[in-house]
Image: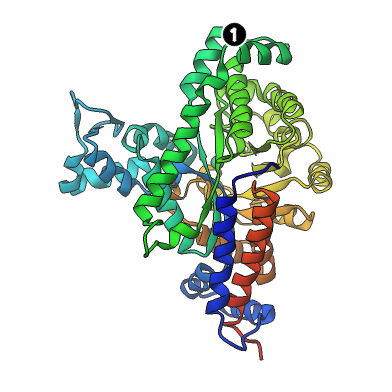
Amino acid sequence: MKTRPLLPIVLVLLGMLLPATLLPSGASADVAGAAKRLDNLRDRPQRLRQFLLGMPKGTDLHTHLSGAVYAEAMIRWGAEDGKCVDTVTFVSSFPPCTGTQVPLTAALSNTQLWDQILAAWSMREFRPDAFSGHNHFFATFDLFGSAFSGRQGDGLAQVAQRAASQNVQYVEPLITPQFGASLAIANQVGYDPDFAAMHKAMLDAGITGAIPAAGLTATTALSRESDLLGCATSEPKAGCRVLVHFDVQVLRNQPPAVVFAQLLFGMELMKADPNWAGMNMVQPEDAAYSTSNYTLHMKMVKYLRSVYPDENVTLHAGELVPGIVPPSDLRFHIRQAVNIAGADRIGHGADLRWERSPDQILGSMRSKGTCLEANLTSNEQILRLDGKRHPIRDYVKAGIRVTLSTDDEGVSRTDLTSQYVKAVRQHHFGYRRLKQFATDGLRCAFLTPAEKKAALADQKQRFRQFEARFPSR
Ligand SMILES: [Zn+2]
């Protein structure tokens, strides 16, 4: 943990005051009443969703910014920015539009094209066939990338508004900062199995030179979000109250020197810029470089954590099921992310039951305080893992701190509330457990100690207000 500017803390403290003024006089928190209400709604999905929509959910800790944006917005922004779309492949691109490409504006008046793009850029209408959910899901990012380019602040405003509408206080969107700069340094320096030597060579080659540009990415997005939501006006939108820190995305399906350069850049960026709170490794774990070099990557993280002990790390680990990889690759990803890399949190952890000695892994996570970001909709769509096949109950039973997150709410056409609905309908959790997901989320968040204390106090107040609506007597 490290110190951060005072402004976000002041905003959080201000936020704490608001719910108190809205609390009905004489009302008191009543967990039993809320728990009973949830049980009554368990088999009434529409009303259950309404109940869970208003429930304080704390945070969404696993949300890729580009994946969090709904494709409708990307089409509109791409059209405004003069971008193109290929009518055969649905790849977006920068102008001029040539060959089978047309301006994205065409989609605004052509319903068939609009529907085709939405289907290609998200899981809308997706039906599993030979081209699996896994492939369709990950392919979307290559299609909408150019349309979304330059619109991160717009995306952030959408994410913050959606979060606020679901009683979420804090989000930690994932962005890939300055990949080109890390790639250039990696190509210049090359790979060295001596991590300390490669580390020094990359610093000497000027890898920190891209920190100001990465800083600008964050401040530009935050300032655009603030403008769009009117945060400095007398009528700020609800999203202004949602605190944001970014996590650095490291692309893992790259040659070793490129992965190391990105990890190193991420550490230096977090050290220099408080807008960047954590680091994560992304892209499919089953891709060629990702699988061949998984253990090497964990050792890189371990080395860098020893040099930058104050920086936060969360890792996608175990986003796998049998059939996606050979059995031997199913046996160690969570274990190594926890025991070698020493991640503060892991994302997914879906292949737990196929790993070697799951009980030992759970024991390690509990003793180290490793958190789990569970992404129920994402696991269902990409891995076809749902209901009793999903290991979320194993983590809960083992006393691991678990929080629910969306992964890619735009691509998946979902939201955080839907994850809570699934936790009730598919996994039969009750109100007290959902409340624990919400509080553990904030406990596992990459906030400064002061921010965390303020956020937890704010959450406590929000729960008092929410539960007062359901008196048990
Ligand atoms: Zn993810």
Quarter-of-image position of residue 253: top right
Whether 348 is drawn above or below 160: the answer is above
Quarter-of-image position of residue 276: top right
Q: Mark 1 points at which residue?
A: 190
Q: Which residue is drawn at 25% across and 31% down?
A: 88
Image coordinates of residue 461 in percent, x first then y, are 62, 71
Position of the N terminus by quadrant: top right
Image coordinates of residue 373 in percent, x first then y, are 63, 48
Q: Residue at x 35, y 36 (%)?
A: 150
Q: State left or right for residue 311 relative to residue 220.
A: right
Q: Which of 37 and 211 is in front in this view?
A: 211
Image coordinates of residue 374 in percent, x first then y, are 62, 50
Q: Which of 387 and 374 is in front in this view?
A: 374
Q: Which residue is drawn at 67% across and 9% down?
A: 192
Whether 95 is drawn above or below 444: the answer is above
Kindly identify the amino acid type of the residue bearing the numbered disc 1.
Gly
Position of the C terminus by quadrant: bottom right
Whether 431 is drawn above or below 32: the answer is above
Q: State left or right for residue 35 relative to residue 212.
A: right
Instruction: Give the total of numbered labels.
Output: 1
Figure quadrant, ligand 1: top right
